[in-house]
Image: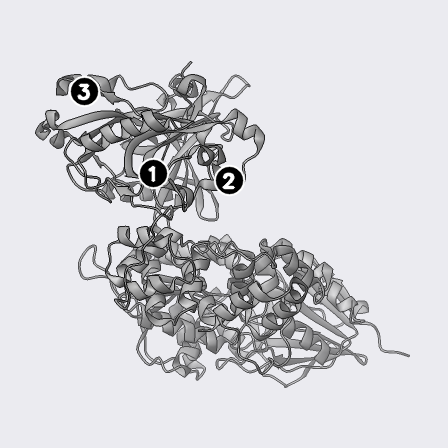
Amino acid sequence: MSLPAFAELLERLLFTPGRNAKLALLKRWFATQPDPDRGVALAAIAGELRFSTAKPSLVRELVATRVDPVLLAWSHDYVGDLAETVALIWPEPDSRPNRPPPDLSEVVETLELLPKSEVPARMAEWLDVLDAGGRLALIKLVTGGLRVGASARLARQALADWSGHPVEEVEEVWHGVPPPYLPLFRWLEGKGPRPDPRDAPVFRSPMLAQPLEAPDIAALDHTAFRAEWKWDGVRVQAAAGPGGRRLWSRTGEDMSAAFPEVVEAMDFHAVVDGELLVMREGGVVAPFADLQQRLNRKVVGPKLLRDHPTGLRLYDLLFENGEDLRPLPYDTRRERLEAWFARVKPERMDLSPQIAFASLEQLTGLREGARAAGIEGLMLKRGDAPYVAGRPKGLWWKWKRAPLSIDAVLMYAQRGHGKRSSTYSDYTFGLWRPDGQGGEELVPVGKAYSGYTDQELVWLDRWIRNHTLSRFGPVREVEKELVLEIVFDAAQRSGRHKSGVALRFPRIARLRADKPAAEADRLETLMAMLEEGRE
Amino acid sequence: MPPPHPDTWIRVTPQGLYCEPGDFFIDPMAGAPRAIISHGHSDHARPDHGAVLATPETLAIMTARLGEGRAGRSQQALAYHAPITVGGVRVTLVPAGHVLGSAQVVLEWQGSRIVVSGDYKRQPDPTCAPFEPVPCDVFVTEATFALPVFRHPPAAQEVRRLLESVALFPERAHLVGCYALGKCQRLIALLREAGWDRPIYLHGAQQSMCALYERFGIPMGELRPVPRPEKRGATVLAGELVLAPPSAEANPWARRLADPVTAVASGWMRVRQRAKARGVELPLIVSDHVDWDDLLASIAEVGAPEVWVTHGREEALIHALAGRGVRGRALHLLGREEEESGEAALDLASAAVGAEDAA
């Protein structure tokens, strides 16, 4: 299949807001495209294609040979994105050369084999036969960074939906098969055996917990459960062995490059489940905001490594020397984890302790006291439960500590996307502080787009339309009159916010139309809730 | 004696272009004593002039949009290619290919000729007469899409993409944002040419111009108003096409449509981030303005040694013309809107929706 078909897919993925519609587009792609092109496209979407000979600078140099530099600069200013500017501005020959556009796989093979000096000429030949969409697809393909709103995880879900296999199975196989994934497609279409990852450090779908709600608490047989703290970091899976080492996120993204110190410490042949945390001396857990400095980085400098060192707090042992422990009960796995840890003593890791308790009342008390930094609440795990991928009911519970709350004033509202594109559904709210001239001003402290009921959403939308002060594209500034009760899990110091504070998981608990805006909370009230690193 | 240069008898004023020997303005801001109007869009055809000269179609559009009494105290219709003389200046209206009735205003005085093109395009449009190049000493042009990144694909191709999307999502309505004058009727005509013979549903703001086009003999096929759902909370028009003003999808009015795919037909849709920022799901690159290539080709065709640029990206156009030996001059005319660019369109849509919902 040729590049234009891939361009059409990217175009639709970019502009389609809904997850289900994106899945439908990907499923249709897998069902209708031939090998190896469907796999090449999949690799591009999953961010698994890399070319050493084609870089953004090549594209910049190439277009400079064809376009007036002044017009190019103005166009780049206007469009913003270089790849898109080049795709749009590339002069089209008066008559298209009488050659078919290249196949996806042809592009990939050529770029892998061609000497670097010949790449620009070949790129120019391809650009000459493509239209604007095709040119953009080609440039994005070879320089990386598709950014079409479809992740590797979404692609795996689409593979699962299309083939009828559970997504967990697809994920286990995925990282053991390189692009263009021919054995994977053969297996998914029932034409070949399940690819065996052997010792490759593949991702295994993690076991997730259900939130514990009031009715569940009453029915809980506490003697069957073990308790641990729910740490406020990033859940990860560390897989290491003769086949390599990988640090996986909960959704199967490879985080290895961002946390080299952890990967270095993974000097074992096992798969462990744990929480990635910034850990100060003596195992003190830093607030989540500190960890945030380390997330979403391709490379990490020495200063960050020194100031924000990370480590793992271990919850579970999934594999030991190639043996799959997941069918074993939690209690057995815990014993194996403790024994393994005592023997291997991995650097930068410790065990998440189990918390002794004798009654439900005692557990409730522990949860309510859980206000220390780095703790989100409690985890309850059944002692006899195997490690099951996904979110099975009744085996693991997460019992978050009670949220904090403030009364804030609605300042701005933004329209949502997809089904909510006609509704103002995202709200920026603020608190009062002195304006430095003897008066008071509102400073924005956060943004919430959940927590309300459908009726409340309708009411809010109408209120916003009737109280608009000004508009900036999809955003409206409203009269500072409506008080919202906001609940959130924690408040943390932030240099990136004007107010100096960032909220974790803010959502709207209640509309307080009864309360005058002047009686909303002040910033200092929120500052008093700030969570500091524990000394 | 050589003919006088147009800048000796055409002046740029805050009201717009003024022809001194003829004592009239072209597309002036509101309230000029004598005005020649190139076409019916509101940034060119403003209310409350004294005497108005325009094509019969443009006069009808002005009367329909501005209301009886505000579309000029007196109106004079002038057909294409039927020159008249005003104060010694020969005035001819020549098709501009922009919308129904759109005209280039060709002015000749003492052997010198200036063409004020208004807005124009070169792509075929079944709803209006095509642009005709007129050789001249000065060509006056807009520069809305005057960057080489703007190239409009054939409109028929974009309409095909729209129909492919309708086939792909039969359970959803397709809501196409488009200008009520020109773009809307062109899309309908192109849809009919592409074989879409089902009824096309119109937002209230689109209906009167469609009716006017039909009165001038341009067939639109079956058009219907967008119905209200029979039950509260139900939705309508799955698998159907709805044409509405740009940004109508942001209004509560749109909630009656079945999970609408929001499309917008505009030259700006060429730039993906611009489309994405507006939340457009299906951008359609359909414009009634010239793109970069057609702009330069048109200027070459009329052969003018000098080009005056009314508004838009004049610096890019003037830079490109300099490289071709053509002198460019920026006029910075006031009050010209960029096509579908601003909140103006949104406000227009809100007003129209409000009026309809109140009715």
Q: Nearer the viewer, mark 1 or mark 2?
A: 1
Against B3, residue B279 (above or below) is above
In the image, A134: left or right of B14? left
- Quickly name the residue at label 2: A297
The mark total stands at 3
Question: What crowding class fits label 1: few (fewer than 14 Cα within 10 Å), some (14-19), or many (20 or more)?
Answer: many
Quadrant position of residue B7 = bottom right
In the image, B162: left or right of A163? right
Chain of the residue displaying label 3: A
How far apart marks 1 and 2 lie (CA) works out to: 26 Å
Amino acid type of the residue that numbered disc 2 sits on in the rendered structure: Arg
Tell me which residue sits at (54%, 36%) in the image.
Answer: A300
Element class at badge 1: strand
The location of residue A165, given as percent across then percent down, is: 24, 58
Residue A270: mark: 1
Tell me which residue sits at (32%, 73%) in the image.
Answer: B167
Chain of the residue displaying label 2: A
